[in-house]
Image (tube, grey):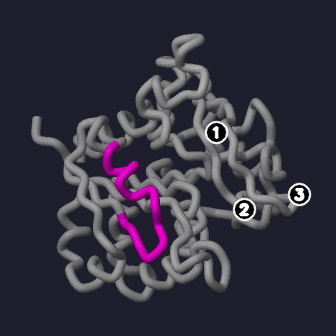
């Protein structure tokens, strides 16, 4: 079976594009890193893709707010094409800064604010999959996912989190600790169709066991973030 083509969108200041591309390749995709401005000049790259990832980092140094400038690049350059891509049901994932971008482009509900305690957070967290979620990225995942976080603006805000839960749009919640004050311990949200996922933690940084700080003490294969990407790539292969 041919590896589904995946596009990893990067911008000035993003620093997880190679990590995300590697995770997608390990899951079976053929990943290419493309700047948002390059996509605007060559929209056929997006048309030919079967999966899109928006990389984490600090695009444009978080000028004017985290993710705002990269979101503007996307909406001005390929906004219509990106909305069409989502409408086809093809998988999209935005991680950390990428999550911020997806909320600013209105591809995902809610917004991300400064951490409640006002400090940058860098630690490992545990994410609990929600059985009621319709998200294709977390489909069938029953074990908790372990992964690191690294953000200063990761507090998820939404006026009615219960409505999101009822609609199946909360795929993952923090279960170890809520590191940023996100409402209802929400670590990730998806769109109503379930093909667009945004999350603040970095599953692309736990795709092999040796990346876990406790890998020498216990096996963590059931907790790999790689499983998210395997689901996304499997869905892309069916498109």
Q: Is residue 165 above or below residue 129?
A: below
- Identified at 49% across, 48% down, the residue is 194
Q: Quadrant of residue 153?
A: bottom right
Instruction: Point out the residue furthest to the bottom here.
Output: 76
Sequence-wise, which precedes: disc 3 or disc 1?
Answer: 3
Q: Are marks 1 and 2 in contact (CB under 8 Å)?
A: no
Instruction: Inspect this view and state whether residue 22 appears.
Output: yes
- Identified at 49% across, 52% down, the residue is 193
Q: Quadrant of residue 10?
A: bottom left
Q: Are marks 2 and 3 in contact (CB under 8 Å)?
A: no
The magenta segment is 9-22
- Location of the N terminus (image quadrant): top left
Instruction: Give the class, few, some or many, for how many residues have Cα within 10 Å of label 2's Cα (few <14, many ≥20).
Output: some
Total marks shown come to 3
Q: Is residue 7 above or below residue 138?
A: below
Disc 1 secondary structure class: strand
**Disc number placed over residue 181 in the picture, else none:** none
Query: Residue 234 magenta-drawn?
Result: no
Instruction: Inspect this view and state whether residue 188 appears.
Output: no
Q: Which residue is mark 1?
A: 172
Residue 62 or 77: which is nearer the viewer? 62
Residue 151 or 109: which is nearer the viewer? 151
Q: Which residue is mark 3?
A: 117
Q: CA distance from mark 1 to mark 2?
A: 20 Å
Instruction: Give the class, few, some or many, for how many residues have Cα within 10 Å of label 1's Cα (few <14, many ≥20).
Output: many
Residue 35 or 217: which is nearer the viewer? 217
């Amino acid at each position: 079976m041919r590896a589904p083509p995946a596009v990893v969108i990067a911008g000035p200041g993003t620093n997880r594009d190679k990590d995300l591309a590697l995770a997608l390749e390990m899951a079976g995709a053929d990943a290419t890193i493309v700047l948002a401005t390059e996509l605007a000049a060559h929209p056929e790259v997006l048309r030919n893709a079967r999966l899109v990832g928006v990389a984490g980092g600090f695009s444009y140094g978080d000028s004017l707010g985290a993710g705002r400038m990269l979101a503007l690049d996307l909406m001005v350059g390929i906004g219509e094409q990106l909305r069409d891509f989502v409408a086809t049901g093809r998988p999209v994932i935005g991680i950390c800064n990428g999550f911020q971008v997806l909320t600013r482009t209105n591809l995902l509900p809610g917004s991300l604010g400064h951490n409640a305690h006002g400090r940058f957070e860098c630690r490992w967290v545990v994410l609990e999959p929600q059985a009621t979620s319709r998200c294709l990225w977390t489909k069938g995942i029953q074990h908790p996912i372990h992964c690191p976080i690294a953000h200063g603006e990761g507090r998820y805000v939404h006026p009615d989190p219960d409505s999101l839960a009822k609609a199946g749009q909360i795929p993952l919640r923090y279960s170890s600790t809520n590191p940023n004050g996100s409402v209802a311990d929400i670590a990730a949200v998806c769109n109503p169709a379930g093909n667009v996922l945004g999350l603040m933690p970095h599953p692309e940084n736990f795709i092999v066991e040796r990346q876990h700080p406790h890998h020498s003490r216990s096996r963590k294969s059931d907790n790999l973030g790689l499983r998210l990407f395997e689901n996304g790539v499997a869905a892309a292969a069916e498109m």
